[in-house]
Every structure is written in C-alpha cells, then in structure tokens.
Image (spheres, rainbow, N blue to C red):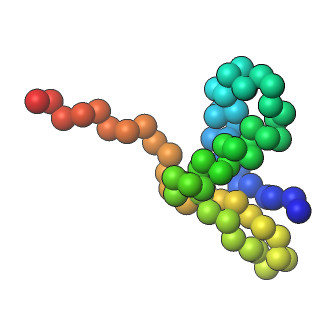
Amino acid sequence: MKLHVDEPLRFWVDCSYEDRKYQNASRTRAELIAEILRDYERYGDAMRYLNANVQEILRLIAELRPQPPPAPA
C-alpha cells in the first residue's frame, strides 16, 4: 500500500534523510525513510489517518521548531 505524506512532513523527512544517509550507507532509501517516518510517529510529531478515498495519509501534527535555549542560571 502506498503511503501519502503531506508536504510539511515530506520536507522534514527529506532533511532527516540527508542527515542520516551517510551514517547508514548500507540501507536503501526506502528503508531509511520508513525508519524516519516511524520515528516521527513514535515521538508524536506525525499521525496516520484515512482520507475520504480510504487512502492512508501520514500527516505532520506538531510544528517542528528548535527547542528554546535554556534559561540562564
């Protein structure tokens, strides 16, 4: 089954793929992207749902922003 990914999530997956592809040279692109998508789901940044055409969609559910700097001590 083909998984549809929304545009904002696709952007972040592509960024993560570029970061990880040299560390995991023996893995295929599909395997690495599947791992990245599972990580986004596990951490609550993405979720799966079915659209009106019963297609499985993976969608970004949280804004991915850098963490704020720690408060001065």
Q: Let me know if residue 32 appears in the view.
A: yes
Task: From this view, report whether residue 64 is shown above or below residue 18.
Answer: below
Q: Is residue 44 above or below residue 18?
A: below
Locate the C terminus by quadrant.
top left
Quick check: 11 above or below 7? above
Residue extending farthest to the left is 73
Task: Tell me which residue sits at (87%, 59%) in the image.
Answer: 2
Q: Which residue: 74% across, 55% down?
A: 5
Q: Quadrant of the N terminus?
A: bottom right
Tell me where residue 19 sits by quadrant.
top right
Q: Is residue 30 left or right of residue 7?
A: right
Q: Is residue 11 visible?
A: no
* Residue name at image x 77 percent, y 22 percent: 25
Image coordinates for residue 15, horizontal then vertical, percent: 65, 33
- Between 69 and 21, which is closer to the camera in this rendering? 21
Asked which quadrant contains residue 23, the reply is top right
Residue lying at the far right in this picture: please name it: 1
Of all residues, the one furthest to the front in this rendering is: 26
Residue 17: percent from left, percent from top: 70, 33
Compared with residue 64, is residue 69 higher up or lower down, i.e. above or below? above
Residue at x-position 79% and y-position 41%: 31
Viewer-nearest residue: 50 or 21: 21
Could you tell me residue 6's position as x and y percent? Answer: 71, 55
Horizontally, residue 55 falls left or right of residue 40, namely right
Q: Position of residue 61 (x, y in %)?
A: 55, 60
